[in-house]
Image: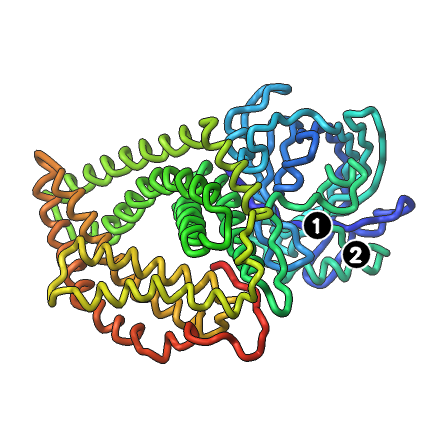
Amino acid sequence: MTVLEREMKFRVPGHFDASGLPGNFGNLVITDPVVVTLEAVYYDTEDLRLLAGGMSLRYRDGWMVKLAQPPDRPDLMQRLEVPIDGQDGEIPAQAYDLTRPALRGASPEPVARLSTKRSVFEVREANGALQAEIFFDRVSATRADGGTGAFHELEVELAESAPDSLLQPLRDRLDGHGVCEVVAVPKLARALGLDSVPDPPVPVPQLSDRATAGEVVALSLALSARRFLDHIPAVILDEDPEGVHQARVATRRLRSDLRTFRRFVERSRADGLRAGLRTVTRLLGAVRDLDVLQIRLLSVLDQIQEPERRAADEILSALTMERDEALSLVVEGFRRESFVLLLDELVEFCAGPELTEAAAAPADLTLLKMARKPWKKVKEMVAGLPDQPSPEQLHRLRILVKRARYAAEAVSPVGGEEAEEFAVQLSELQDVLGEHQDAVVAGDWLRRREGAQSLAAGELIGLEVARATAAAEGWREIWEVAAKPELAMWMTAPQTEGATRPRTDN
């Protein structure tokens, strides 16, 4: 079972005395310490790919993979802890699966052995409830090259139920004892003599005041690549369907960006990357479609009464088995050499895209018009639709709307708030068209049920038909808003202020 670790690290001087920490403050009490000794071996590659990728791999009493998570505040470190069974010296398969986006085929080796004398102080409420732990660590490190080092640090780790707001009073308490310098650096980095972690494999570039088209292209590709790499472990862990969803969205965005910006990047490499990502998108899509179907069926299960209810439960069980099989194909695909090579190419390409001469032009003079083509295709298709479009036509329209939305979001650094608002409207249109497609897919899947399940499936199909009908009747109203000419005026002229703004990828 994974645990979200929320901690704040502090650098402390060698003469720091922790004996004054215990005592009462506010409605909290810091207990007397318990001292333990911890021995751990940390693994990484020669070029420290795990550290650079926000990951760590160690063996202490068992294997542990830690995965950095976006912090809620800049002075807080958040990492997902994944304990894994296995023998010392034999890295488990799951550890490789979780760290593959950072390792990309490289083999981790022991890089440091840390011996830590830890004083553990508990922070409890008056009723005894544990709110946090304070660790005073005196660390001795032996590196793989034979070098040694030592350092002291102090950590405040919040309990699972403790609010982030508890950090400030704890920090004030520590300030009073001479602890004030926050250091958001993992132990391994300090053991290796580093003041900070290495740069990530795909850095997110900053835009200049008058960005070129190439700068915006590089930013868009980097954000989507990071999104994909960051969510691969969530796909493997399979604790939340959002992991598969976000990984799939990232691959779709990457493929869309490589299509939209094809004239600015080296064509053959971009086409090869798109082809590789197509396979990954297909594998993830099979799981995501079943996740959506499961969510939909669970939401209406209470409407199915006996005797069909038992058959409906069997339908859900069959769906779960099919979904698990689809996920196993994803995991198997991620273990293939072709996927590792794809990750390498993705990182190399998106970390420093090979740009064409056209990419040197100012972004506001070149990129805005690139959003027109996918938008034009949407308008042309809507104009040619009959009064009652077929499910296939609405599905095709959704794909075109998604491409137009992604294009608008990709150029939003130069399109500004107008481009962002346009993308929001397209997102709403995409949602209602997606609701229709999800209902159609659900109905098709349910129609394949046989035997005793067919009656319950019939009731569920009726509910999905109603959903599909509502979406088919409601999308044009949203279209009328999205198609207002003033919403697309930003595509027709460059920004007069000559400035660009960072894109937010959400």
Q: Could you tell me which residue is drawn at 33 percent across and 65 percent down? A: 375
Image color mode: rainbow
Question: Residue 234 at x, y = what percent?
Answer: 47, 42
Q: Which image quadrant is residue 67 in? A: top right
Q: Which image quadrant is residue 45 in? A: top right
The local secondary structure at tag 1 comes to strand
Query: Could you give the CA–CA distance between mark 2 and mark 1, rounded to whole angstroms?
Result: 10 Å
Q: Could you tell me which residue is drawn at 85 percent across and 30 percent down? A: 148
**Residue furthest to the right:** 15
Q: Residues within 10 Å of mark 1 (few under 14, many from 20)?
A: many
Q: Left of 447 or right of it: where is 279?
A: right
Q: Is residue 85 visible?
A: yes
Q: Which image quadrant is residue 291 in? A: top left
Question: Residue 290 at x, y = what percent?
Answer: 28, 43
Q: Is residue 427 visible?
A: no
Q: Nearer the viewer, residue 414 or 439?
A: 414
Question: Residue 49 at x, y = what percent?
Answer: 64, 36
The number of numbered badges drawn on the structure is: 2
Amino acid type at circle 1 is: Val
Q: Nearer the viewer, residue 291 or 230?
A: 230
Amino acid type at circle 2 is: Leu
Badge 1 is on which residue?
156
- Disc 2 + disc 1, Cβ < 8 Å: yes
Question: What is the number of the mark on residue 391?
Answer: none
State which tag comes first along the sequence, 2 or 1: 1
Badge 2 is on which residue?
174
Q: Is residue 16 above or below residue 49?
A: below
Q: Could you tell me which residue is drawn at 65 percent across and 30 percent down? A: 58
The local secondary structure at tag 2 comes to helix
